[in-house]
Amino acid sequence: MDNQGPGRGKNRLDKWKEPIRMDFPYIGPFREDDPVRELIHQRRANNATGDGRKVKWSPLSAAKELIFDIDNGKPSYHVITSGFDLETCEWITCHLVDLIPESDDDAKSILLEANAFEIPVYPNNDTVVSQLAIYQEDVLRNGAKITMKDGEKRFRTTRLSEDFLSQTNLLENLDPTVFLSPSELLVVRRYVLQDIEARDEAGQILERLRSGISELTICLAATKRNESDLQACLTKYPILFGINYKSIIPQHKLGSEFVMDYALEKVSGDVDLVEIEASSHRLFTNAGDPSKALIHAERQVSDWLTWIEEHHTYSREHLTNLWSPIGLVIIGRDTTDEDRVRIRQRNRLFKGNVQILTYDDLLRQANEFLARLTGV
């Protein structure tokens, strides 16, 4: 049957097109003149130049699995392998020998060779899982040194790589035809769990963002003054302020003189200050002059900034990064192109110290953020 039809990947069966010939790992005892011993040596001599792949017997090449452990603070590998017991005439699998690395580099070299031979490496118990995972991730990312005839050389496995571990959708991109040792799965599991956690967090952000957009849209449909409803909405959904802020502090006081609607702490640690006004306020008169409500809000924020400059030590007792904040005024709607132009012109007058935003600005940036997250 043809297994290489369209859309099919490589077959694991292809690996076994050529047999692997291995020296017989006999388990004694033998007499010097034992005929079986002589037969084994004769067969080895006859097959020395035979066809196919031939691997000299070693604890690793013949191992069924390795069990990683830490004994007296040092790593070790218990080798589980098979051999023919001449006393009982049984082919047995047993704990044959222990490999004791002399250093961390040796421990990683053994792990690399086990990966290359596709020998599963298991932690002996829960207490050694983290150390095995550390060794394995280092091997996957940086490879390990192997002693060759012409000196030490560094090798890396090709099944998994640093690029593979760094990609998103790690679980979906795993090749089911590729062998993964339990030690490699420890590393993959950690990255998959991180991916799942990130997706879960992203899902929560999406849910809060969509809910915040919906609730703010409802609040803005009101025709009467609505500061309390808007403040409740923004307090419930601080993500509406933007992704640059990691926390908000409602009703933050500046001494006994002022109470700000919000202090916004940025990811960088800097702090911005917010004054919110009703969305029903007009920003400009018919003549194009700033409205009384806008002038009042601007003056309020300017008074905060002046107070902070005059009381800079006291102002940072509760907000240590309150150095040179920006005062944000959130007010009204920008229903016309002329309004948006006037707002930009007015923001330039304050040279970045005070910034006027409308509730439409909040909605626009929230919807843009949602579009980036969803790719829509």
Image (cartoon, rainbow, N blue to C red):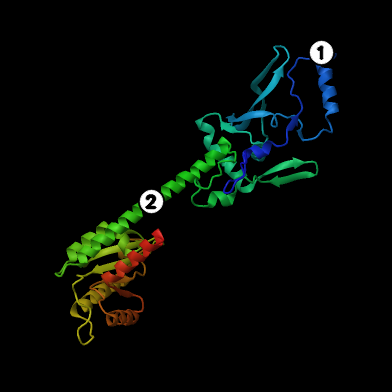
Q: Residues within 10 Å of mark 1 (few under 14, many from 20)?
A: few
Quadrant location of residue 365?
Answer: bottom left
Left or right of 100 in this view: 54: right
Residue type indicated by callout 1: Arg
Tell whether 41 sits left or right of 310: right
Residue 242 in sight here: yes
- Dot 2, how many residues are within 10 Å of its Cα: few (below 14), some (14-19), or many (20+)? few
198 vs 256, left or right, is: right
For mark 2, what is the residue?
201
Q: Which residue is mark 1?
A: 31
Depth check: give the residue in front, 256 or 189: 189
Q: Position of residue 266 (x, y in %)?
A: 37, 62
Q: In the shown orientation, is residue 101 left or right of residue 335?
A: right
| Picture coordinates of residue 249, whole percent (x, y) | 28, 59
Sequence-wise, which precedes: disc 1 or disc 2? 1
| 271, 213: nearer the viewer | 213
- Of all residues, the one furthest to the left in this rendering is 224
Mark 1 near mark 2, Cβ–Cβ under 8 Å?
Answer: no
Seen at 67% across and 38% down, the residue is: 15
The quarter holding residue 48 reads top right
Relative to 211, is 51 above or below? above
The kind of residue on which mark 2 rests is Glu
State whether residue 244 appears in this view. no
Tell me the SS state at disc 2.
helix
**Residue shown at 24% from the left, 65% from the top:** 260
Q: Secondary structure at mark 1?
A: loop
Please name the residue shown 84% across and 33% down the image: 49
Tell which of 82 and 302 is nearer to you. Answer: 82
